[in-house]
Amino acid sequence: MKNVKILQLSLLFVCVHACLARADFAPYFYDNGPYSQNGNLALFSLSEDTPVGTQIYQLNGTDPEGHEVRYGLSFDPGSKEYFRVDPISGNITLIEKLDREKQDSIDVLVSITDGISKVVERVTIFVMDANDEKPEFQNMPAIIDVLETTPPGSSIYKVEAVDRDTGSGGSITYYLQNPPFSLFTIDRHSGILRIRSGEMLDYEKTKTHFVTVIAKDSGGNFNGKEQFLSSSATMTINVIDAQDTPPVFVGTPYFGYVYEVSMPGSEIFAVVAKDGDAGNPNPITYSFDEDEDGVFSINKTSGCIRLVKHPVFLKREIYNLKVRASEVSPEGTLMDYTVTSVVIRVVDLNNNPPTFYGENGPQNIFELTMYEHPPEGEILRGLKITVNDSDQGANAKFNLRLIGPGRMLRVVPQTVLNEAQVTILVEDSAAMDYEKNHFLTYKLLAVEIDTPERFSATADIVIHLLDTNDNAPKFALDYYIARIPENSPGGSNVVTVTATDPDSGPWGEVKYSIYGSGADLFLIQPTSGIIYTQPWASLDAEVRSKYNFYVKAEDSEGKYSLAEVFVTVLDLNDHPPAFNDNFLEKTMVIGAPVKIEAVDDDAEIPNNVIEYAIMKAEPNINIFDINADTGEIILKSYIKSMAIIQNITKQRDTTWSLVVQARDRGQPSFSTTAVVKIDITEATQLNGGPLASFIMQSRNKPLQILGILAGVICLMVIVTVIISTATFMRNKKSNRILPNRRVRRRKQQQSWLKSPFRSSENSGDKFKVTEEVQEPEPEAVMDNINYNNNVSNVVRQSPPPPPPCAPFLPPPLPTYVPRDRQWAVPTISATVAPKPRKKPVMTRQDTVNKALVSELKLRLEQKRLNHQ
């Protein structure tokens, strides 16, 4: 029975499950349209410049039963996978670079499932174009031939380029590089290349042109920015020559000569002409335009001009022949021609070259001995030179030139006709220097000017120079720097100076001497220039470490030059440090250093640099530190009071003896020691107040104390003057006459000068007038008292600073003082509070004074009332 119930329940569960399964609905995508960023990718488009890794879309769908859905994305077999989808969020990410020019659409299978049902849809993603492709030329680079007679504006080539982009990125515009300097233009849209209007090609000027064409798209978006892409290619344009240029003569102008010995048939001259169209030249034929009396003939093919008649029968000296060069066409007809002139001159035969003559006939070597540096413009009279050309007219005209080192000499005349006496002048006297050249060699050249032969002649001119004393000795250096250790023995070498005189013989011998304020300890060898110390000289760097003097180099005639010598005496460590006294007594206040000082008489660092060290302490408990550089001795940082010292030593005696060493840093090092007895005490407040305490602390510095006291006195005098002036001005404004008062000194009062050294409960007590002697207050303990020479103030432990000190002189009495009222002296910054005092004892003299004041007051009041 139990098994039957179980079987029934199982059948019931199966039926229910089947019913539920039949009731399940498939999930589906949202269709949000083509411009949405989520849905089912329907009609979705994507730019090809989208970076890899970008999230481009989100699949979005739902399940009617509300089950969680998962997304999928796949491609057809063999297709490249461009995207990846997150199954949970549906985010689609680009994983491969897109290229619209290769694939402009991508088929994708997107799916959505709720775990039971799965829906698959095929969608197409359109790849949108970005401007990422440059224009590509289809027929470039190119080489074309263009006839030079092509008319301006003619089309000579069409450039074609393709841009695979779409839209504006695929629209191409053509340009030429450097268009203002080009003979060509190009149509921006069609790419047709033309010859620029108003320009012509010319083979004779430029045979080949190189034209750079730029193809540029109209721009488009790429990676979010506007981008323009372009390409360039070069076209070679060869210009084809045309028969449009007449012949051209080569080597014009033409000149020929007929000489007296010329024979009929002799070649006088040959003209040469070429066709101006060098690309396709025609043959040239020559002829005379005008017949010159039948004197000359010309070869039609070679252009050679020959003499027909004997020179004896020539009636003119100059013949001007007109020669025509004509092109011959392939058919044999004459075409373009050019005419030029050939000038032929009938001249005498130039058969005699120039010749130089001396006193004894023709000569080609002339010699002279003279001293160096002759005056400029002087004539070299020892040279007897004549030049002659036996020809006549232009054949006897020639130039004279002097060729040699520099421009020391000049020849006169420079142009000669037939014959002349040659004169040589000095032009640069300084260059004629025996020390540079013992002799000078020049070439005297005579060259014909107007003759075809250009005959010439040369002669050698040799000048032997004699020396003079024209140079002073010269030192190798302008100054000499020498170093010598101190304590060097007398006669020690210091430095060697060298001077040279390029003159010869006795003029070149140099003698040395020294002089100057620093030369007393030195000597110099006159011939060698060795400078050494006096035999008795003792150099000491501590006495004098620098010497300078002059050394003189002089030749036999007194010409000289100077150089300066700087001698440095090198310091040796020959002085140990020294204390003023080997036994020193110092008083040390806790917290303040005690300074000792030693002196090293050496002149230089590091010989005079001293280091200090404590070698021994008695009692043998070292509670001190010492500054190795300054020599300041101070207690160790943990010692703050006398109690600590007594606790350490177990004694009440606070006197130490220190052995202090002072050592220099020289090599070898020297040292010395001194015993320093130090009495340690604590800072105390002296009876005289802070100023007295400071004076007590600075008792070893009297000049500092006097300076401070003088400053305080001056300050009080100034304050007194200011107060007196202010009182006078106040009384003057009130128009009242005040009675004169006298300040009486009482024997019971303390002297006014002592008041700044006293302490009271109130800082204003210094300015109160009292009759009783004030008891000194207990001494206040100082927090820090410094005996350093650079510190002149004492910092008190009490928080408020003391008020400004009043002047030492007593202030003037007020105009009216009631019987029981006190008075106070005003300061610069404030008024000190009054302090009650006892009623003064009235004496008989005081009573009389009071009566006089009262009577004077009454009279003044009556006088004032009468005036009213």
Image (cartoon, rainbow, N blue to C red):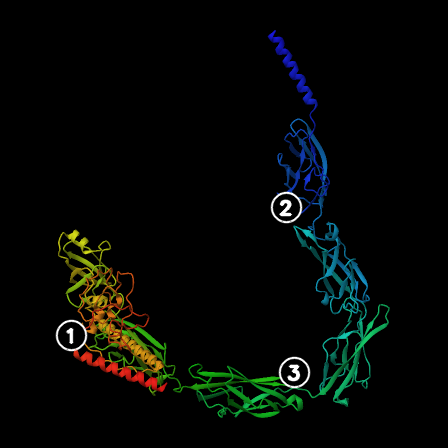
Decide which of 220, 790 is in the foreground and name it. Answer: 790
Let me know if residue 162 appears in the view: no
Q: Position of residue 456 (x, y in %)?
A: 60, 84
Q: Earlier in the sequence, mark 3 or mark 1?
A: 3
Q: Are marks 3 and 1 in contact (CB under 8 Å)?
A: no
**Element type at mark 2:** loop
At label 2, the amino acid type is Pro
Which residue was labeled with disc 3?
453
Q: Earlier in the sequence, mark 1 or mark 2?
A: 2
Decide which of 856, 353 is in the foreground and name it. Answer: 856
> In the figure, residue 819 lies in which quadrant?
bottom left
Q: Position of residue 272 (x, y in %)?
A: 75, 75
At label 3, the amino acid type is Glu
> In the figure, residue 851 lies in which quadrant?
bottom left
**Element type at mark 3:** loop
Task: State which quarter of the image contains the C terminus.
Answer: bottom left
At label 1, the amino acid type is Lys
Decide which of 778, 251 is in the foreground and name it. Answer: 778
**Image position of 720 (left or right of 87):** left
What whole-number distance in Å separates the C-alpha atoms at marks 3 and 1?
139 Å
Q: Position of residue 285 (x, y in %)?
A: 81, 74
**Image position of 273 (left or right of 726):** right
> In the figure, residue 481 lies in which quadrant?
bottom left
Which residue was labeled with disc 1?
747
Please tell me the numbered disc located at residue 51: 2
Q: Earlier in the sequence, mark 2 or mark 3?
A: 2
**Image position of 32 (left or right of 326):** left
